[in-house]
Amino acid sequence: MKTNVFHYVVIVLYVVAIVFPLYWLVSTSFKTHLQTFAIPPVWIFTPTLKNYEEVFVLRDFNPYLLNSVIAATISSLIAALVASLAAYSFSRYEIRQSDNLLYFLLSTKMLPPVAVVIPMFVFMSTLRFTNNVLALVILYVAMNLPFAVWMMKGFFDAMPKEPEEAAQIDGCSFIKTFMKIVLPQVIGGIFATFIFIYIYAWNELVFALVLTYTNVSQTIPVWATGGLTTYRGIMWGESGVVGTITIMPVLIFAFLVRKHLIRGLTFGVVKG
Amino acid sequence: MHIPFFSSKRLLRYALIAPALIWVIVFMIFPLIYSLNLSFQTWQPPEPPIYVGLKNYIEMLSDERFGNALQNTSIFTIGTVATEMAIGLLVALSISRLKPRIAEKVNVVSVIPIVMTPVITGILWRMIMHGDYGILNYYLSMLGLGRYSWLSDPKLTLFSNMIVDIWHWTPFVALAFTAGISAIPREPLEAAQLDGASYWQTFKNIMLPYLRTILMLVLLLRVVEAILFFDINFILTKGGPGVRSEMVSLYVYKNAFWFWNLGYSSALSYIVLIIADIIGMALFFIVIGRKKK
């Protein structure tokens, strides 16, 4: 019985350590200036939307939000499409050197982003393609493809081959077989992969930090690195608002794919 | 005429993988080849680049600031990964003893820090660790443990970065281990219990062998990510005060985009790349090797 009490204490401390900072972030976004600095900290209060007004109206947050949505959505759609074709081929056909190709893709996941971004900055500057959301889209596709191929290959591998073979014997074209037979069976897996790469793109900092300069293309993380402090220090209420708005979509998405989360985070090796 | 290689079926399978491979090669690998070339040059825009051979790599050997960054990254990596593995394992063992319905809820909570935007995690902890108004100091002083300058005390800032990383990634380790523990077959565990084995004996002799692959895999992923730690380092302390919490990725970034040493920073980035990839691939093949047996 003693070990049981110990384990409960561990769990309670663990949950509090995670939830408490998150609650504090969200509650700060609804506090007045006075409540934010109140000692002792205020736990129950009448929420105010003043900070939200501040961020959306006075700080003109919308362009950054829009850039983040565009960069993450377009790049994830392209990456999911391109990766699903490659993953299908790797899963179904004999590809020469397929193991080496897959390891090659995996190894790019270990590349330091700062190593890729220096030459990329030179290229994009030469092509006058900096400060453009499309430049981010291109890089986010490249960043997410290896992971997407690995994860989707796992879903294709788990799918029976017989229905496709039967369809092909019946004379169905590849495109028809893929759309009618294959896709409906792995659509859940493709959706989970899409959510994953969406989160990665949404959270990305280094590429956007180097390649974007103004609200024409800057994403939320880049703007948040500098936009939430002044010479007087941290802007508390605004930090709470931007933090809350930025993590909400990610938390909702992650909740939708939580069954696949461990599989995704371990490149499909651990089937959670 | 029918040439086998160009038969439509053969062509198709390569046509399907080509876009993915080409995209990655053009936008990831080709830039790296270019920056390898750049690493043999000195280039401080707007001056034109000059080839200098191995000068950048030789200079690195006596670059004390790079040495400092390497040391910080080593301390950070060993400290955070060891702590995350230990706490993560403890939490996973505790979760595995909960009722499935409650365990499921705890697992949902675990997801939160893992998927949170790192920049926001940094901003959140910058507020929590604030010297005057931070909630951390408030509760510490209430417990009589004193107040600390988490973000400006030279002795503490590296440690503060580590705390945030541990908060960020321990839940991932816990989730992975929870998945691993739930995949262990029940019979040997129950048999051990009947035989009166202690908890520690059961863990060491029955659970650990089953968990070995996951342990190595989690170790691999955490070590590589810790070596490349950047976002929170950039937000929380910007490597400061001075260079006390500056890690390798941040040093490479500053060299390129604050000091505009594009050649030298390329050389530095290659060393970081080699370190991360060698450690990563070595651990990876240990994992795969074990899996095949």
Image: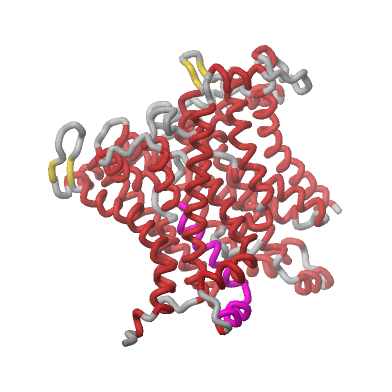
**Residue A154 among those drawn in magenta:** yes
Quadrant including the N terminus of chain A: bottom right
The residue depicted at 54 percent of the width and 60 percent of the height is: A267
Looking at the picture, does residue B188 appear above or below residue A188? below
Residue closer to the observer: B60 or B148: B60
**Residue B285 among those drawn in magenta:** no
The residue depicted at 78 percent of the width and 74 percent of the height is: B187
Magenta-tinted stretch: A144-168
Q: Is residue A103 visible?
A: yes
Residue B262 location, x and y as percent?
Answer: 25, 39
What scheme was used to colour the molecule? secondary structure
Residue A107 location, x and y as percent?
Answer: 41, 60
Residue closer to the observer: B268 or A171: A171
Q: Is residue B160 visible?
A: no
Most distant residue in the right direction: A1
- The mark total stands at 0
**Residue B14 found in image quarter:** bottom left
Most distant residue in the bottom direction: B1
